[in-house]
Amino acid sequence: MRRQRGAPTRPARPRLRRVLAVGLVAAALSLTACQPGRESRAAGSGAPTSTAPSARLAPAPCGTYSGRGCAPAGERVDLVRPSFSNPTKVTNRLFPIGELGSAVLLGHVDGKPFRSETTLLHDTERIAWDGQVVETLVSQYVAYLDGRLEEVARDRYAQADDGSVWYFGEDVMDYRNGAVALTEGTWLAGREGSAAMIMPAHPKVGDVFRLEDVTGVVFEEVKVKSVGQTVQGAWGPVNDAILAEELHADQSTDHKIYAPGRGEFRTASGGDLEALALAVPADALPGPPPAELQSLSTTAVGILELARIGDWEAAAAALKRMDAAWTTLRTATRPPPMIAARLGDAMHALTGAVKAHGAGGTGQAAIDVAQSVLDLTLSYRPPAEIDARRFGLWSQQLRVDAAANDLAGVTGDLAVLEWIRDRFAPTLSPAARAELDTRLRDLRGAADARNLPAAADHAARLAARLRDVGAL
């Protein structure tokens, strides 16, 4: 839980700059059990993930490195033994993981642009803990720093009968140069330690609860500072938010906001910011997307292709149409400010790249524009559809990086494709899903062989085939 958890998201950190826990648990994680493209255990099938002896909810020592700074046990509301009769039905509005399909968080970490996507997956997992087997929801978290894959995690959640939401562990993969470098921070209830309360049923000022509490591995403690607050959401005010302070193992603290229907809303610490830009269905809008969104998306990809063949006159003309569409959209809909700012920056970069006749810069800026356009479209279309289109966009990113002879970039792009696959593949027909997996394996083979032209060709063919079957 180093990173922020937005809407259907994870507990927080500042994730991308967390202090490494004492004692790695990499050996405890079987990488083959959590690789991209793996089919997760279906609801109610197979043996439970964890089979360790029952845990007991006794007060654990303070999890900071110094052993000091934690709240007294008398302030904690998580020292209870929860029961789980219907654990995947989540009604807690301050951590509504069961209904939130997709969320986008934006901000900056270490002075670089930050982005994360959190998605509720189609599977559930059964976990044995404290003498009971609990069916948990599974959420995928993917974080990017400066446009590159930085971290992926799979999180498990369940709601107790009293309405509190509990966290049952995570598989963590930190990426460097496109490959998994660390799995530190991975834990599972009943294996490394106890499940942890991530949100009380009815939080009150002064309530304390630990989001993670595995000695020597992970530790986070939250104290509620105020309730009944109003915050500014994607499309307007959101009432009944709570403000909290989060204590980490190194005794640093984050300031956090949780908002109804969205979950973790904002985390700030040391100049870093991770804030919810959009979450659905809380920020969903009626009706079809504005025509300008489709125009921006189509024209951005068109400019990318024009840059590949060096037709700068046509690219400049297309850019004028994009400018007009963006001006109309910005005036008519007043899009969420964080996404609008990213899109505006990308449009500015695209204008400069087209004027300079730079193929690589134009391609990257066009992809950045299209990414923000998809974020806006998420308010109008199902998350699986948006993820399929993100998949197509990352295939374009892979081609841009291959043209730049960037092996690490291509490797990271492929990992993103493999992870996004898990979000929308269940919506495809069995035949289409099998073909997707086969083509992804071929793409992986080309990348592993460091054959970047072949990888780019596989990526183009993969996207084209998904368009043929109606996935894109």
Image (cartoon, rainbow, N blue to C red):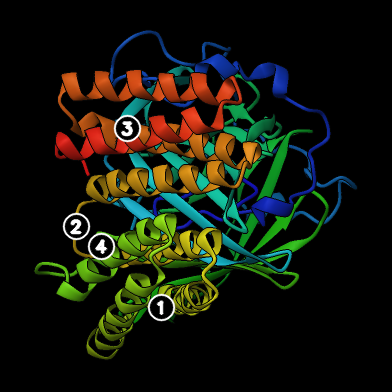
Question: Residue flagged by tag 1: what amino acid is it?
Answer: Ala
In front: 183, or 158?
183
Task: Report which quarter residue 319 is drawn in.
Answer: bottom left
**At x 27% / y 31%, what residue is drawn?**
425
Q: Residues within 10 Å of mark 2 (few under 14, many from 20)?
A: some
* Numbered label attached to residue 340: 1
Mark 4 sits on what residue?
298
Q: Are marks 4 and 1 in contact (CB under 8 Å)?
A: no
In front: 301, or 232?
301
Question: Residue flagged by tag 3: what amino acid is it?
Answer: Leu
Point out the tag, 4 or 1, that comes first from the N-terminus.
4
Q: Position of residue 362 (x, y in %)?
A: 48, 65
Point out the tag, 1 or 3, that comes first from the N-terminus.
1
- Label 4 vs label 2: CA separation? 16 Å
For the residue labelled by badge 1, is the local secondary structure a helix, a strand or a loop? helix
**At x 35% / y 42%, what residue is drawn?**
120
Q: Are marks 1 and 3 in contact (CB under 8 Å)?
A: no
**At x 35% / y 37%, what residue is drawn?**
460
Mark 2 sits on what residue?
381
For the residue labelled by badge 3, is the local secondary structure a helix, a strand or a loop? helix
Task: Report which quarter residue 70 is drawn in.
Answer: bottom right
Q: Nearer the viewer, mark 4 or mark 1?
A: 4
Point out the tag, 2 or 1, that comes first from the N-terminus.
1
- Label 3 vs label 4: CA separation? 19 Å
In front: 348, or 85?
348
Q: Nearer the viewer, mark 2 or mark 3?
A: 3
Q: Position of residue 244 (x, y in %)?
A: 59, 67
Reply above or below: 470 against 315: above
Point out the tag, 2 or 3, that comes first from the N-terminus.
2
Residue farthest to the right?
66
Point out the tag, 3 or 4, that comes first from the N-terminus.
4
